[in-house]
Amino acid sequence: MMSSKPNASRKTTKVGLVTSSAADKSVVVKVENLVMHPLYSKFVRTSSKFMAHDEENTCNEGDRVLIEECRPLSKRKRWLVRKVIERAQ
């Protein structure tokens, strides 16, 4: 008998800042993270950039967005823009 976990199919989500929206239906999202340095025990700010699919081309540079993991859409795109949390000024 198979046991199904309720959280097994939940997809990863991240919140980041749109750094580029030049490509059609694609945006580059920068996600910042605080990591403790193993030797000096100080928090170091690291960042990662993800290509995300923006179907309606609604995102602009500076927007804060929620992205969700999905199937591979192209060579580098593996994320979907779920919603715009905050618009750029």
Image: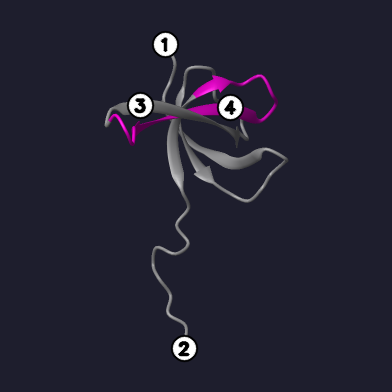
Tell me the amino acid under the disc marked 2. Answer: Met
Residue annotated with mark 1: 89
The part of the image, by quadrant, that contains residue 35 is top left
Instruction: Determine which residue is flagged by label 4.
Output: 28
Mark 3 residue element:
strand
Which of pointers 4 and 2 lies earlier in the amino acid sequence? Answer: 2
Of badges 1 and 2, the one in the foreground is 2
Q: Earlier in the sequence, mark 4 or mark 3?
A: 4
Asked if marks 2 and 3 touch (Cβ < 8 Å), the reply is no
Q: Is tag 2's residue or tag 3's residue first in the polypeptide sequence?
A: 2
- Which amino acid type corresponds to the residue marked 1 in the rendered image? Gln
Q: At 45% from the left edge and 57% from the top edge, which residue is drawn?
A: 10
Q: Which mark is residue 44?
A: 3
**Residue 24 at x, y percent in the picture:** 70, 26
Q: Which residue is mark 2?
A: 1
**The residue stretch that appears in magenta:** 18-40
Q: CA distance from mark 1 to mark 4?
A: 18 Å
CA neighbours of label 4 inside 10 A, class few (<14), some (14 to 19), many (20+) = many
Query: Considering only vertical position in the picture, is 6 above or below 23?
Result: below
- The spot of residue 42 in percent (x, y) is 28, 28
Rounded to the nearest angstrom, the CA distance separating label 1 from label 2 is 54 Å
